[in-house]
Image: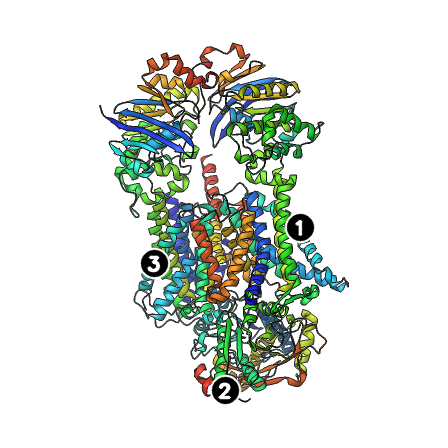
Amino acid sequence: MSLIANLLLGGIFHAAVLFLVAAGLQLVFGVQKIVNLACGSFYALGAYFGITLVTLAMNFGLPAWLLLPILLVAGVLMAAVGPPIERLLRTVYDRDESFQLLLTFALVLMFQDVLRLVWGANPQSLNNVHLVYGKLTWGDLSVPVYNLLVIAAAGATAFFISLFLRRTNYGRLLRATAENRAMAEALGVNVRSVYAVVFTLGTMLGTVGGALVVPTSAASLDMAIEFVIEAFAVVVIGGLGSMPGALVGALLVGLIRAASLVVYPEFEILAIYVIVIAVLLFRPSGLLGKAAT
Amino acid sequence: MLSVKNLVVDIDGSPILRHISLEVAAGELVCLVGRNGAGKSTTFRTIMGQRRPVSGSITLEGRDLTQLYPFAIARLGVGFAPEESEVFGDLSVADNILLPTWTRQTSRSVDEREALAYRVFPRLERYRTRGGQQLSGGERKMVSIARALALDPKLLLLDEPTEGLSPAIVPSIVEGIASILQLGHAVLIAESNMHHVPDFADRLYVIERGEMVYAGKPNAVPKSLSAPNGPDGE
Amino acid sequence: MRLSRRRVLKSLAATGAAAASPGVFMPALAQTGPLKIGILAPRTGIAASAGISGLAATEWAVEKFNAGGGIAGRKIQLVVEEETSPKDTIERFQKLVQQEKVECVMGIVSTGVGLALGPVVEEARALTIYWDGTTQDGVDEKLLNPKYLFRSTDNECEAVMSSLLAIKHWKGQFKRIAGINPDYSYGRNNMAAFIALLKRFDIEHEVVTEQWPKVGTMELTSHVAALKAANPDLIFSSLLFADLPVFMKQAHAADLTKGTKLVFPAAGWQHTLMKKDFTPEGMIFGHNTLYFDNPQATPMQKEFVAWYAEKQKDYPNWEADRAYFAIASYKEAVEKASKAKSGQWPGVDDVIGAMHGLSVESLGGKGGWRKDNIADQTFVQGFSTHNNKYDFVTLDPAKIETMYSADLQKPPGAKFWDWLKTAQFKI
Amino acid sequence: MTAIVETKNVSKRFGDFRALDDVSVAVREGEFVSIVGPNGAGKTTLVNLLTGLLIPSNGQVFFKGTDIAGIGAVALAKRGMARTFQLVQIFPQLTVAETIAAAVVSQQDKAWRLFSKLASDGAVRARVREIAGIFGLDGRLKSESRLLSQGEKKLLDVASAFALNPEVILLDEPTSGVSTAEKHGLVQILIDAAKKAGVKAIILIEHDMDLVAAYSHRIIALSEGKVLADLPPKPFFADPVIIETVIGRRRST
Amino acid sequence: MRGATAMIVAAGVVALGLVPVLAPPFYANLLIPFFGYAIALLGFNLLFGYTGLLSFGHAMFLGLGAYGAAVMAGENGIKSFEVVLLGVALAGALVALPIGLLCVRFIGIFFGMLTLAFGMLTHAILFKFYHLTGGDSGMRVPRMNILGLEFQAYNKIELLAGPFYYYCLGLLVLCGLVMWRIVHSPFGLHLRALSNNAQKAEYLGVRVYQFRLAAFVISAIYGAIGGAILGFRIGLADPEIVHWTHSGHLVFMTVLGGFSSFLGPIAGALALTLLQDQLQSITPYWRFILGAVLAAVVIFLPRGLAGIAGTGAALAKRRAAA
């Protein structure tokens, strides 16, 4: 019983981080119609900078319980790479999507070296600062409160994104732009600034995801290239451009991975691709996506 | 106020507008009549900045619009209700109508602008919370016009405002347009049906195959233009 | 395009039209001028930390050697290229040999690359010394009887050693064993070697679960949960790269490591990331051929570690030893061969001949080359302790064990799995 | 004379919406038939049924005596019906010759010839020249389609359809986007071309009553999914009710 | 123009033919992968440039070629490279058929993602089915004879730099000629038509779905042949060859050279091969520069190197006319 609970928690924790990155992808695709291969690079960027900032903060003697807010700050700060990259992408908005895909691929190549230049080739890791929040133990079940906080943070992000998109004027403006860019612009929406904001937000979701995961994990140069495929799987399963889709997709991928470990470990990675292909074939718009073209 | 001179527009290298000129003075109601494909929508979209003209000029109160982005043109006070209504399906009716109040500040308060929009189409009050997807064609049309009105525009571009509406509503739209005029806005309407041109139109242009074939008073249109050149397409 | 063509044309005179005929690829052994040595090391990706350590040690050695007059009187000049995919690395190797005309190539961390490069080395007849990267699936010989290629220890000596230590110290204290190993040949072979040795020593055991996470997996909580559910007495793990500290963290957070015996032959790969916070004391911890904090270390090792710590703000892993061993043994061999030829610069065959039977003091301890071009080196393992000045675990000085690879790897020509069944181990 | 294209009691519903209701029309050999009607009358639906794109909810659609419900564009082209679109449809990066050749290749069943050299296929080349000649495009064979004038694009669009050697051709607003000065010329070229190419019947979907009045043998007016009138031009234009409905429906109803 | 293309091809073949004779031996070896890529990209561009379908998983077919060679020559002792080429071509077609049936129902980004998913599925299979595929260490591709000749006097490097080089050059010319015929055949015309305007094409009798599938299968065959050359050269088939970033590099080469021209992808393969070689020697941060080059090409040179050549030729023509 505790195995299932443990697996479930593990799966959900993984899903929480996946969701953040995937949500960034979805936001950018939803509004700008760009599939961003560099989302994994943003994730890695957040992870590396998270370590840097936490280490710095600890050296300054900031109390350990500030970990979570510091990581959030790290993620938010790194979103600063968003606007210049958006400026670069602006040159291909009106072009074929293959060019957009390629430009983000170019970013993936470039980021690999940027990360190495700044943080070196060795993986980086924090010590167990995240256990400062303690552990919940329940019989055999033991889970760091930090993991729950990350799950909660991802949940809160989902909630606030949805709140932002549904309840704020700017969010409505974004949805209007996503649906019909020309009409929104004809009603006075400055689409360029909206794009810059959206891309920065999307970037931020990626960097925050990376920053939040790093205390339980580590930052390494290959994490970008590995992660992007999983994030892709999430958005394809959930439906391109759909926020609820990102949530459902992330949960599915997280839980399937966890479940396959018990049921049939050989199948772990394969399972995800098989599901991606099945979804694309039978519901190309994804489980919660709008009709595909 | 709005002055279009010698406008030439190509789409993918094909000429769509051929030396179009038209004028709208402050407070005027001007109609642009022509069947579908004649170039009315292209004229509107070019005024809105969605298409770049090959040559010619468009000025609003003396200010050149051809180099501006559509949002800047909208913020100068040009409201636009397109032919297909283009109501945001993801947003409620209320949000659709409020949207322009978030992008443009005017001397009128948001509440006032909202109230004006609903005053023109009172029945929209009932649909406030309804999603844009759950509206009939006529309702969408009304939302689209009300939304353009909520921008508190100096100039309102209405592309086929009565198309697809049940005849019972047409008078209320026409009344709506009249009240818009009373607010001091200028209105430019595109119409495919000569019969739908409001009686109180100040001026009328007839466009055919991208060429202006008539400009003048509504009651002086030659019979040859108004008769066989009838309905629009699908 | 045009530029490179001009360059191509320029070198036309030098090379001549005979290029396409056999026999011209022999590296020209110029006897004057600097001695060019090519290095192929990964700089990015999962193996980067090994590459960085190896490169640093090589640079240190070159500095030292050159200060002492170089190799047989010639100053060393390094030509560094990157080890990437098998295809690209072969190209880089050929660039070193054919364009740069280096006299020896050193490096290679990844097995896949090593396997692909092996035959190329032989055909290029260029003396090449692998730092690492000779894990072979099934530990069958894939690079048969190489002449020019010198390889590091060719089965997972560290796994054999850890297994022996576990048997020696914990016999009778565990029954339920679990494994979590990277899903590629290295991980598979390590786990298999452990189980084979348990059988060899008639240890009653039950494998309760085997996990094979993909290399680069940074989210192992589900694996941890599965391990925990299996309730093992002992966990054997050859995880390495960044996956290792991630696993330790997540295992610690889930209380998996408490009261469980841990056998981690490859832990030294990321030793500075094994923070005390989440790495328990008393685990079997493999440092391979270099333990940086070894109290019995030679002055040379201590000097190197101090230099490294200052330059890299880090502590070296065993790849530093492998790299140093490669260049130091090359130096020895060249100088030995040169002496035999009364000071004349030796040919490749002379150097190769001199390599065999050589014994050098490397950073981590004694090392030498067997007749079959396989290295023998000194392995260091022990039990982790928190009692040190670092924020990561080191080895308990009282329980450091050292073994020479002659006792850990199959003899020339033997089949690994058969050898495990019959070999006499010193425990 | 027997009908070459025919619908028998065809209805088409989309959900609750009845786009066409019990429509029976026929086009016979040698006829030029126009289909007119106001917005939403069901013209597009009728065209899609006639071209085998849609399957009727009720009734049948015949072309040369066989049911073509939903057979799709390729099969339709094979059987001898071609269509053009209201918005010019061309292959922007193909030359005029290539565009026409694409149709000729289908018509001569050579599409699966993977390794044969198209340029040296005399039969294709001859047919391309012939078609281009009919439409006055022979001077522009090597031009990329996107560089043509609007009128030429129109002609090319239609010419490529003619190259299929169709028995029936359906022209969906062929003069849209063409200037007033050019519209009659264009239709005249089309009719001449049809004669030369041996087209047996032309179906024209058009708004421009000028054109409809000038060239049709028969006019079918649709209104709210039903056939309102099916008459020769003279009686058609003489009937004020029809004219009012087709042209000024909204005011009157 | 056709005459000009023929001249470029002739000059290119002669220049490539002279490389083993004139250039340092390293360059002949460096260019073997170029031949593999060039052949694969001829097929890839039939799919991308001519049919309008961008695959982000095309490396799976190169992998198929390399692993196919490993299985046929390594496991089953087939020593003739020609037999292996035929085998992998057939295998490419057989594998591409079902995958294509599923993928070509989509275009644009969905086609790209579906092929990406299939590519990574292949990667995962190669990794996971360790006992069959050797996992990360891959499978050996032994030396094979070419045209029945063993070239025993040559070691492999010499074989690669000499006979095999010319063999690949010949193969590239052959595959290029066949592809030239394909794109200039009625079939090729229909592919271009459907990628320009699928709806119109359908009304002109173009079997859009079948033709996309056919292009997919042909591109897979070319990919497998290119992969077999890579396998022969590397001597190993490893999972990296099917990784998505490798697929990205195929697209990179194609766009660098220019996908709207027949020779563009070949030029791109050559340019990237030489560029990467130079950059790797100059700086450890060559990936960054490659990325920057790609970004610059995407932004400023959407028609690639062939675009520059085209513009140059047009300018020259205009100047000559003036």
Q: Do tags 1 and 2 sit on the same chain? A: no
Q: Do tags 1 and 3 sit on the same chain? A: no
Q: Which of C28 and B127 is in front in this view?
A: B127
| CA gap, disc 1 and disc 3 | 49 Å
Q: In this view, does C162 lie to the left or right of D96?
A: right
Q: Which of marks 1 and 3 is in front?
A: 1
Q: Residue type at mark 3?
A: Ala
Crowding around mark 1 (Cα neighbors within 10 Å: few <14, some 14 to 19, many 20+) is: some
Q: Percent from the top left, x then y, of residue E213?
A: 36, 49
Q: Percent from the top left, x then y, of residue D207?
A: 41, 22
Label 2 sits on residue: C201
- Which quadrant would the C terminus of chain B be assigned to in this image? top left
Identify whether B6 is placed above or below E189.
Answer: above
- Quadrant in which residue A226 is drawn: bottom right
Instruction: Say which element carries label 3.
Output: helix
Q: Nearer the viewer, residue E28 or E268?
A: E268
The tag on residue E89 is 3
Q: Which of marks 3 and 2 is in front?
A: 2
Q: Which of B213 and C256 is in front in this view?
A: C256
Label 1 sits on residue: A80
